[in-house]
Amino acid sequence: MTDLKLKHVTIRNWAKFRDVKLSFPEKGLVLVQGKNTASGGALLSVGSGKSAFGEAISRTLLGVQGRFVHLKQYSTDKAGDTYVKLEVELRGKSLVVESGYRCKELSTTGDALKYTYDGKVVQRGKIEQTRAELSSLLGVSPLLAKWTAYIDGDSVKFNTLGQENAVELVMSSLRQPPWSAYHEASKKTINLFRRSMAVTETTHQNAVDALQQAADSVADAAARVTQEKADYAEEVRAHAGRTAKIKEAVGELEQKIKKNRLKVALAETDIKTHGKKLKLMEEQRAVANKALEVKMHAIEDAIAAAEEARTPFQTARDDANEKVTEARMAHSNYASASKDCPTCKRPMGKLDPKHLQKLADALAAAKEAATEAGTKWVAAEQKVVDLNIEYRAVSKKQREVSAQSDVENIADAIEDLGREIAGVNREIQDLELEITDHNLEIARQSHGPSNSALISAEDRLADRRDDQKAAQTALETAAVALAADQVTLKTLEYWNLAFSPYGIPNMVLTDAIGPLNNESRRVSAEMTGGTIEVRYSTVKELASGLSKAQLNIEVDNKLGDKELAGSSKGEGGLTNFIISETLSEVGQVSQRVGYRWYDEIVPHQDPKVCHSIYSYMKEIANRLGILVFLVDHNPVAANYADHFLVIEKLGADPDVESTACWR
């Protein structure tokens, strides 16, 4: 039972196929026939689109390139909307493969490829990536498919294959991994590792150099210690002769220190005295000013209270004066008016003496009230004046206190004391520095020659020895890493050789030669009756002693040329067809693909060979349970067909289109 079964195909705007939907039979030999109705009788079947139909299926499913590099070259018009959908059954599960150019289903910008298997949709960023995954799923590479699934009689020419592709073709037919790809990948890995290993080697060499430098530094530091020891011994001997002079110098320095310390004590006493005087003067002035400020604040509060108490009296006085003015005006107006009275509005000739007296009494009462209110206001105002006089007196007293302080030059005294204190402080600092210098000189003279240079040299020697140990450790670490990298490199080189034509591929190819020759003899016998026999051989011995994987083709043509390249068109086509069938049968490719498409593979054969080939195709279709499509113009082929697929080209330019149907 085959892994793959063709179920349905949908083709739109591919070559001349505007819109085709077709379902496939289960198995059998399918004769693909063409009708070029559009030619008006000039052509029978040429140009109807038979090859284009096979390319649509095989390019979409298997990646066989066909006549064009890009899908847009198959597009019916410039707008695109080219789309092929192939529905198949793969190992009992649905597989849908879609390809197209500027179509709404896949991509509106260019070529695209997508497949869906067991509910999982795969469409990578690049078509090549999607194609690689699909080829891996099917177990058939585009190169193998070109030789075993979509066989074009004009393009399958084994003698034009390079040796690498020839070996790869056999390997892929046997479902071998892509050893050449593994070999290239291993070479890249080795190159990358060698670059990485170069860093390890550099690290190791740097560690060697660093250790040598550390050893040189240790030697230099040891020589320096030896020299410093000799210099220190000489200093000790010289110092022994200067002992008396050192004691005398120490005594003089001690006397200077005593004198300086006495100066410091006197200066500190002066500072304390001046400080007390300054503090007393500041306290006295602060007390006097504080008392005056307190008194002034009390007077200010009394003035504010007196001014507040004066306000009602001032208001009463102003109201009384206003009433006097009103009474005076009323009396005056009444007495001197020539017309009506402004008060009673009666004519002047009718004045009432009692009323006039009443106005006079009211004026007198208003004056008396105004006088009383004025007296009270004067008293309140006098109190405010008295308080202001007192405030001015206190303020004057405060100014006198300030003036008295200036007279005594308190500020100048404070400033002088400040300068004096600063001078004493500087003197104390100078004395302390001098004392420190004397103490250091005494210590130096008392302890004799300094061995600091010797100690420093010994410390440097210890550091250099530590550096030498660290460099030795780093070298050992680098050596271990380098050794590990060398082992890894040998392993990588081993696998690189194993993946190369001298390794596993050579072994596989050698083992495959027997089955290839057996199947080739069987196919040759069925097609030619043993007249042409194709044999395979391998192994090319190199000067290095290695054997390289190489596939050699030998043609035993009992009636013609022994070389494939020198055969006639008929013999060459038949030989390449035998090679194709041998690869398909040995590798059981039909079980993986489920169909074969033969496109005019026997145009140059005589009738007897054609009968053998047609019979062979019908036999493998039924024996393997696959569909075998045959594009052929020989009328005899119809006698062997189980099904007929008719591709008909209709209409006239520019509306030419092709259809596909079963008959």
Image: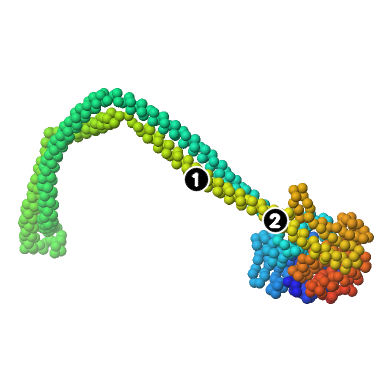
Q: Residues within 10 Å of mark 1 (few under 14, many from 20)?
A: some
615 left or right of 488 in image: right
The residue at the point 40 percent across, 36 percent down is 458
Q: Which residue is mark 2?
A: 499
In the rendered image, the vertical position of residue 98 relative to residue 179, given as above or below: below
From this viewpoint, is residue 652 visible? no
The residue at the point 11 percent across, 55 percent down is 309
Q: Which residue is mark 1?
A: 473
The residue at the point 85 percent across, 58 percent down is 554
| Colour option used | rainbow
Residue 166's image quarter?
bottom right
Q: Amino acid at mark 2?
A: Phe
Give the position of the N terminus as an image quadrant. bottom right
Q: Which mark is residue 498?
A: none
Single out the mark in the foreground, 1 or 2: 1
From this viewpoint, is residue 202 visible? yes
404 left or right of 600 in image: left
